[in-house]
Image (tube, rainbow, N blue to C red):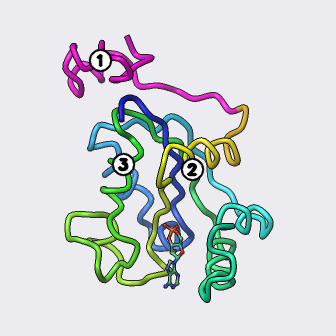
Amino acid sequence: MGFERTFVMLKPDAVARGLIGEIVGRIERKGLTIAAMRMEMLSRETAESHYAEHRGKPFFDGLVEFVCSGPVVLMVVEGFSAISVTRRLAGKTAGAEADPGTIRGDLALSNRYNLIHASDSPESAEREIGRFFGGAEFFGAPRERLRWIYDAAERRSPGGGGGHE
Ligand code: CMP
């Protein structure tokens, strides 16, 4: 909780389906800030280390092939409770089971082609941001915008919108 940064990847299905704007729009409309963003083709090595915890699972090879099959959008998203909020915006992994109102629930049906990856914990967020954005500059939201997203007391509280006062 508190002010956090999380790592988000829009997968090749999101890019191929023309859903970058739709998904980024949902993240921004919630009040979170895109603090860094770029587009690239993942190398097999990078994809395998990003998904290392799934190595050995039946879907691992197909997953790595899929995320390397086209360009992805890499982002750092920041704001109050950014890690859990972004996970809830994404919805459950399996598109067919994800709740309506979520990105996957509204836009996906597949287990694999589920449009978005978002860090699942502060430890994952730190590791994944470091992997993809080590040394990068992050751009916080202008204070005038945050004024309408966080109450002044929240912005003053430890961690609450910290770094923006
Ligand atoms: P993500 O949140 O990026 O984390 C692991 C990814 O593996 C997941 O999204 C899906 O893209 C993929 N995945 C998870 N479960 C399955 C499955 N049963 N079959 C195929 N792909 C899966």
* Disc with the residue nearer the chain's start (3 vs 2): 3
The magenta-colored residue range is 136-165
Q: Secondary structure at mark 1?
A: helix
Asked if labels 1 and 2 touch by Cβ distance under 8 angstroms, the answer is no
Residue at image x 69%, y 72%?
A: 68
User: How far apart are the two marked residues, 2 and 1, measured between alpha carbons?
Assistant: 25 Å
Image coords of residue 7 (percent x, y): 53, 48
111 relative position to 149: left or right: right
Asked if labels 1 and 3 touch by Cβ distance under 8 angstroms, the answer is no
User: How far apart are the two marked residues, 3 and 1, measured between alpha carbons?
Assistant: 18 Å
Mark seen at residue 84: 3
The quarter of the image holding the C terminus is: top left
Res. 62 image quadrant = bottom right
Image coords of residue 69 (percent x, y): 67, 76
Q: Amino acid at mark 2?
A: Ser
Q: Give the vertical position of 21 relative to 152 (above or below).
A: below
